[in-house]
Image (cartoon, helix red, strand yellow):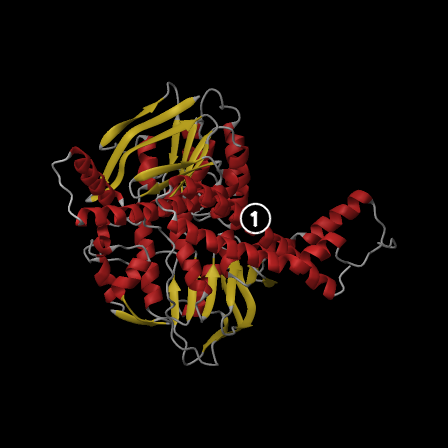
């Protein structure tokens, strides 16, 4: 059943066109994720669907008795209202009168609220967002619209919310940067790209594959049109007689091709050269660091000597002391005991949870030029304008006033400014908040080649898996425990002891029982595959290269071109399978060599 339909929606923001005649539909049970770079209109689209904002053209038609609940990025609250009144009283109906108080209290408890009579005015920004989220989850509605619901939530809370929304039966539309969250919760994706909406009937992983295929098709169409245009151009140069009907059609065809043959722009696929200063032998050392407030001890005797190219993540519940530790390193707060020792060449870049003040009347490019007009990168000198382009600020946007930027664009601009300062120790405190997925991909690529020390505070599991090589977890009473690897490795390291204990309890295995082990070895087929798979991969790669040449030469032979494109697609699929098999066999061979059982 169709719950809501948007038809021919057009919307401008100041002098920027966000949507141009786009359609959007929500069916019963839909779970839709909206993606796109900051400033493309994701939040605006949610507000239009919620009826909070009107399109310049088009209409949004809602079904009879369809109720919509909307959670904005920055919710506002009536003065002097308590948590109870906002979450419970405002959402009470005849149907839920006897259950909403208990259900709301349970959710508020999960979110860390013990006193439901506390006045919302007294809460921090992150706590206010959690109150608004609790109210949205408790609201009796047919369509739930969520704008960045995971902001200000720790990893455990994100997992809880994931499972809650997976089990929820009603329609859901959300904007979020959390890629694991999107992949697990959403079954449909909508991409906003250059004023158009692209719909994908898949989760986030499937969307990435489909988007890549769409861009490849656009590129192939562009290449095909370019080759046809070359032929048409040669015909035009020979001098067509425009009076003949046939030649008129030919000229019209040439003009149409000339207008549509433009290279497709592919967002978020640029490579950004790293910017940093030389880091000497003496880097950063924390010695017996302790810090507490009142009776609460956040950090108790933490010591660690950072090595060059360390990639360290810090995880733990909200309020455990992660940001406090970063501020101690920055010298913004003083420890109760211990010291922070900085080497003479250390230059710290600090990307805090909250943006620094951005002068709304300053132009984007001037804000960056105030830091540096040129920076030295691994590829040579790069201008402020070029760095802005690589961070998805095109020429027109660079000369816009900061006040015209979206919240996410301001966050991206602040990040670039921190990187332009050429730090050799980079501290990122909740860097993924309000950044779009394309920007995060660029940042991850940048950090992969960053030659200095990286310290990350984040609840974003995907980001930590991509960037961190060691984690410190705040585990209560000021203790920090070290784990190797990214966030998934950390979860795995925490889980086994519990799983083993449950198996022992369930199966009643005694301590004296012996477990038979067999030595790990290749099967006959695995041995055969392992011996020949590298040659197979090389042969497939050579065939793909041949096909690419044939495709270019067959640009005007549409039948042959389609056949070649299909063969290339099949060869790429086989190559992917062979690569996965190769990785599995290589890992198995290494384990056999170590004598694992």
Residue 13 visible in image: no
Residue receiving disc 1: 574
Q: Nearer the viewer, residue 118 or 541?
A: 541
- Say which of 89 and 162 sits in front: 162
Which image quadrant: the N terminus?
top left
Residue lying furthest left: 243
| Above or below 46: residue 427 | below
Q: Position of residue 329 (x, y in %)?
A: 44, 69
Measured as percent of width and height from the top left, residue 216 is found at 40, 47
From the viewer's perspective, is residue 167 above or below residue 281? above
Considering every residue shown, the one lying at the far top of the view is 64
Name the residue at 42% across, 67% down. 426
Instruction: Tell me if I can see residue 394 in this picture.
Output: yes
Helix, strand or loop status at disc 1: helix
Compared with residue 35, is residue 345 higher up or lower down, i.e. above or below?
Answer: below
Residue 151 image offset from top left, x and y in percent: 43, 47
Image-quadrant location for residue 388: bottom left
Could you say which is closer to the camera, residue 164 or residue 319? 164
User: Is residue 116 left or right of 35 when viewed as pictured?
Assistant: right
Say which quadrant the C terminus sits in.
bottom right
Decide: is 178 above or below 589.
Answer: above
Residue 121 lies, in percent from the top left, at 36, 44
Q: What's the residue at 52%, 38% (across, down)? A: 107
From the viewer's perspective, is 47 left or right of 3?
A: left
Q: Residues within 10 Å of mark 1 (few under 14, many from 20)?
A: some
């Amino acid at each position: 059943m169709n719950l809501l339909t948007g038809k021919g929606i057009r919307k401008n923001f100041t002098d920027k066109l966000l949507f141009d005649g786009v359609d959007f539909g929500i069916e019963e049970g839909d779970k839709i994720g909206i993606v796109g770079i900051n400033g493309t209109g994701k939040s605006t689209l949610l507000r239009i669907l919620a009826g909070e904002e009107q399109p310049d053209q088009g209409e949004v038609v809602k079904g009879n008795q369809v109720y919509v609940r909307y959670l904005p990025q920055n919710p506002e609250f009536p003065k002097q209202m308590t948590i109870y009144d906002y979450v419970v009283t405002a959402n009470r109906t005849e149907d839920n009168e006897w259950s909403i108080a208990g259900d709301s209290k349970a959710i508020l408890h999960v979110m860390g609220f013990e006193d439901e009579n506390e006045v919302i005015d007294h809460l921090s920004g992150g706590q206010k967002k959690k109150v608004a989220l609790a109210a949205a989850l408790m609201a009796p509605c047919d369509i739930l619209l969520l704008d960045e619901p995971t902001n200000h939530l720790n990893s455990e809370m994100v997992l809880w919310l994931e499972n809650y929304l997976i089990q929820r039966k009603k329609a859901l539309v959300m904007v979020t940067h959390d890629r694991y969250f999107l992949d697990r919760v959403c079954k449909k994706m909508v991409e906003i790209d250059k004023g158009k909406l692209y719909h994908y009937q898949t989760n986030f992983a499937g969307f990435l594959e489909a988007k890549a295929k769409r861009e490849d098709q656009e590129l192939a169409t562009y290449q095909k049109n370019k080759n046809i245009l070359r032929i048409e151009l040669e015909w035009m140069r020979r001098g067509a007689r425009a009076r003949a009907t046939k030649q008129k059609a030919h000229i019209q065809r040439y003009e149409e091709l000339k207008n549509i043959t433009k290279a497709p722009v592919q967002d978020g696929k640029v490579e950004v050269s790293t910017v940093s200063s030389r880091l000497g032998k003496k880097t950063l050392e924390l010695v017996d660091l302790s810090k507490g407030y009142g009776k609460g001890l956040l950090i108790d005797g933490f010591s660690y000597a950072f090595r060059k190219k360390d990639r360290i993540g810090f995880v733990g519940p909200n309020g455990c002391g992660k940001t406090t530790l970063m501020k101690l390193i920055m010298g913004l707060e003083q420890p109760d005991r211990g010291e922070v020792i900085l080497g003479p060449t250390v230059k710290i870049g600090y990307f805090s949870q909250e943006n620094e003040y951005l002068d709304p009347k300053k132009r984007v490019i001037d804000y960056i030029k105030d830091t540096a007009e040129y920076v030295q990168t691994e590829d040579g000198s790069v201008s402020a304008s070029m760095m802005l382009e690589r961070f998805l600020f095109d020429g027109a946007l660079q000369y816009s006033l900061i006040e015209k930027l979206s919240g996410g664009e301001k966050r991206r601009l602040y990040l670039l400014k921190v990187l332009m300062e050429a730090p050799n120790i980079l501290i990122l405190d909740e860097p993924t908040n309000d950044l779009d997925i394309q920007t995060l991909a660029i940042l991850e690529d940048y950090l992969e080649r960053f030659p200095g020390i990286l310290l990350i505070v984040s609840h974003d599991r995907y980001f930590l898996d991509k960037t961190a090589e060691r984690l410190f977890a705040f585990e209560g009473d000021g203790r920090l425990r070290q784990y190797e690897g990214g966030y998934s490795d950390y979860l795995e390291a925490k889980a086994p002891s519990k799983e083993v204990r449950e198996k022992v309890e369930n199966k009643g295995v005694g301590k004296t029982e012996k477990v038979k082990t067999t030595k790990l070895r290749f099967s006959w087929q695995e041995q055969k595959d392992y011996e020949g798979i590298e040659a197979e991969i090389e042969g497939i790669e050579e065939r793909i290269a041949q096909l690419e040449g044939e495709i270019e030469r067959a640009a005007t032979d549409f039948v042959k071109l389609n056949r070649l494109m299909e063969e290339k697609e099949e060869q790429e699929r086989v190559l992917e399978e062979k690569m996965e098999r190769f990785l599995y066999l290589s890992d198995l061979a290494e384990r056999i060599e170590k004598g694992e059982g």
